Image: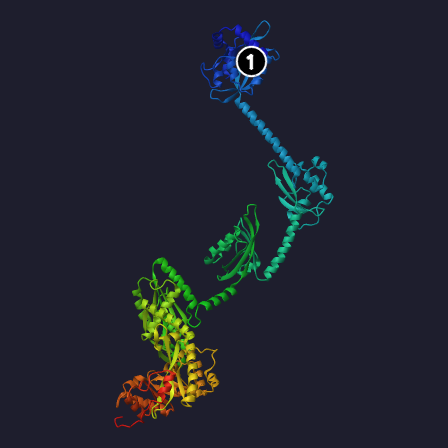
Amino acid sequence: MNNIKSFLHDASLARQSTQDVVRDEASHNPWRLALEGLQAGIWDWNVLTGEQYHSPRWEQQLGYSGHELDASYHAFISRVHPEDLPALQTAMADYLEGRSSHYAIELRLRCKDGRWTWIGASGIAVSRDAQGRPTRIIGTHNDITQRKEAEQALMELNTNLQETTRLLRTTLDHISQGIFLLDADKRIIGFNPRVCELLEVPPEMLMARPTLTQFSAFQLSRGDFGEGELFVSENARAYVRSDGLGEPPAHYVRETRQGRMLEVRSRLLPDGGMVRTFTDVTDYVRTQQALQTNEARWRLALESTGDGLWDLTVPTGEEYLSPGLLRMYGFEEGDLRASLEDRDRHTHPDDLERVRRDRQDHLDGLTPTYSNEHRVLCKDGSWKWVLSRGMVISRDANGKALRMIGTHTDISKRKAAEATIWQQAHFDALTGLPNRRLMRERLAQEMKKCRRDGLKLALLFIDLDRFKEVNDTLGHDRGDLLLTEAAQRISHCLREVDTVARMGGDEFMVIVTELPQVADLEAVLHKLLGSLGGVFQLGLDQVFISASIGVTVYPDDALEIEGLLKNADQALYVAKAAGRNRFSYFTPALQEAAQWRAQLTRDMRLALVEQQFRVVYQPIVTLATGVIHKAEALLRWQHPTRGLINPGEFIPVAESSGLIGALGEWVFQQAADQVQAWRASLHPDFQISINKSPVQFENPDPLATPWIEQLRARGLGGDSIVVEITEGLLLSTSAGVTEQLLAMGDDGIQVSLDDFGTGYSSLAYLQKFHIDVIKIDQSFVRQLAPQSTNLALCQGIIAMAHALGIQVVAEGIETEQQRALLAAAGCDFGQGYFFSRPVSAAEFEQICGQIHVHPPTVNAAL
């Protein structure tokens, strides 16, 4: 470096301007012209002055033109890559100091645009000083960027190749597979250590590069191939027997002399050579054998139960179907494509979406197991219900399902039984109509639809008038025929979208849905009344009935199911009370009446506890003598805030609410105690009449002590009590009511028929039920006068009753003339305001001695 500096110093001392001379020389020198033609850049360096000439080509290599570059060695040095500068300085110093005969170097120079380009620079001294030191050097610059890049790429490729070779060698030396490579002549030219272990041969044998025929002969000679051929295909056995001369199969498994199982795979190479691999699959083969054994065992056990097995390869959709599963649907092997797609095609369209959803949820890991009940198409075209159960047994590293196994169980019989149970639970056995439960479900659905679509629906509560009379007189078989025919008539009056349900007994409920206007309902209601009012042919009998209908509208009247049912019931109550064979709409007034009845029911329960009720007694007078030894017990309710409540108001509510039993029992006990006292103080044969509601007969309390036992406990006989009933009870008596009436007669309790003449009872009923007393209704007595029709009717009733051995009581006597006419007609007893209003027990005792009547006088005016 010091020498270079001295050269530059000397050059500065002797510097003279030679630039023009150099350029002139360059333009006429043929050698330089030739170099320029070879695309080489030329430089000419005056070592003494430091001036440096650059040819146009030299400048172009760096992206310059004209005289843009400073023509000095220092400027040249400044463009050298920092990493290459030390090498340049060393090479130049060696040349200047004579340590090298030629100057040549490869380095990077900075171009005008800032990038680096590789230059191959060389030069030679063309003049020297007296000491032989170069004073002028001329050289060339060649752009070698492409070559350097190619060399760099080649070097990287070589490095990668060496690394790949190293990795490949390492891999081959450590993999569990044995490998050897054969050339086109089937000579072993390469192998890894593992193949020597698996084939039990020394490396030296393979390093000798034997042919495959020679190697196979060696293996056969020492018995390398075992006896087992379970997993070896026929073409593999033929190849082994050919000493390796035959065509090698691409894959086979063979047993070694040590009993190990080797999987052999061969692959031909394009140059005619071959790669052969050997893998120890002993554990896999034994596992497969065990799996096959277990699978066969489980398959046998499974198919013995009648279930079918399916095995799904999830990624491909391929599926194995066991013979038992195919038989379940009437198919044989080969009838179906073993694929999930084909299985889905045989799934019922109504079930398919649910099946796919449940299956996908399990494949996605959202459920622990898969279970689904659906219908499958059989070969004969029928549908069979199956229970499909399964589980994913294999997933990949990402959790994606690979294999899923499951079974199909035939549940057709169970489904049929469930359908039968569902039918029985939701439909009426007699009429086939929906029952109360299904009606409520459909009502909820229709209400939801009305809310969504802005429509209305009507709920009709239909009760068949006088059905009980038909049922009791003609028998239950005829009653069932009537109900069945009525159900059909109701259905025929409606649309398919409407619902008819039997609520029980003779009650039906109708849901008229999609009702644009309430007025549209009128025609339906009249149609129903007309249809149900026609003649019913029940076997040989013809009957006529009518119907009462309660109507409520959703959402006008109520927004909940219970509210609608209650409203329809209230409207039906009004329709029946108004004379039947009609319909009634629910109104707010009905709601108020229902609320009043509900409050009255609550008050009655409290009244029983607080003893707000009392019994009053009305004398029943012997018309012939004026003697009183009979009375009728009547119930009164003194409400603490409402005052005295008429029995006509609270008795029907007590009957409908179920309280009539408790009230009736309380009245009986009061009357029994009173008749016991009056038999002792007033008359030994005193009798008290007690009204008994039909509801008490039809729904007797099984826990209540029989009345005859309670009477006997008081030392009384059955003749101390008379039970008053209405004509309606006789017309609608069931077997249970008949037994109760006959039992009363056996116990000595007399039965009195109240309000006689207003109903439809006949003489047959009077004899059948052993009626002891009839009470002529006050409607006949009220207008009683000499030579009147009512008098004739009363005389007829009295005569008829006496002919049957029945006593007669006339109700509603209010005048002396009425008393005298009835007494003259032979009426046994009289009752009415003429004698006394109903009074308390104490008042009754006081008036018993005050009532005095004269014997009847026969008048020609009668």
Find residue 298 and report its image quarter: bottom right
Residue 105: % across, % down: 57, 17
The quadrant in which the C terminus is found is: bottom left
Q: What colour-coding does the image apply?
A: rainbow
Residue 314: % across, % down: 54, 50
Residue visible at 59% across and 36% down?
Answer: 270
The quadrant in which the N terminus is found is: top right
Q: In this view, does 392 lie to the left or right of 493?
A: right
- Name, please, the residue furthest toward the right: 222
Tell me, yes or no, if residue 836 can be seen here: yes
How many marks the image carries: the answer is 1
- Mark 1, residues whose alpha carbon is within 10 Å: few (<14), some, or many (≥20)? many
Q: Is residue 386 left or right of residue 643?
A: right
Tell me, yes or no, if residue 762 can be seen here: no
Name the residue carrying label 1. Answer: 123
Residue 185: % across, % down: 65, 36
The image shows residue 792, relative to residue 41, as above or below, that is below
Find residue 528 and report its image quarter: bottom left
User: As rendered, which of 326 and 433 lies closer to the eye?
Assistant: 433
User: As rendered, which of 481 and 720 lies closer to the eye?
Assistant: 720
- Name, please, the residue furthest toward the top: 130
Residue 231: % across, % down: 65, 49
Q: What residue type is labelled 1?
A: Gly
Q: What element carries label 1?
A: strand
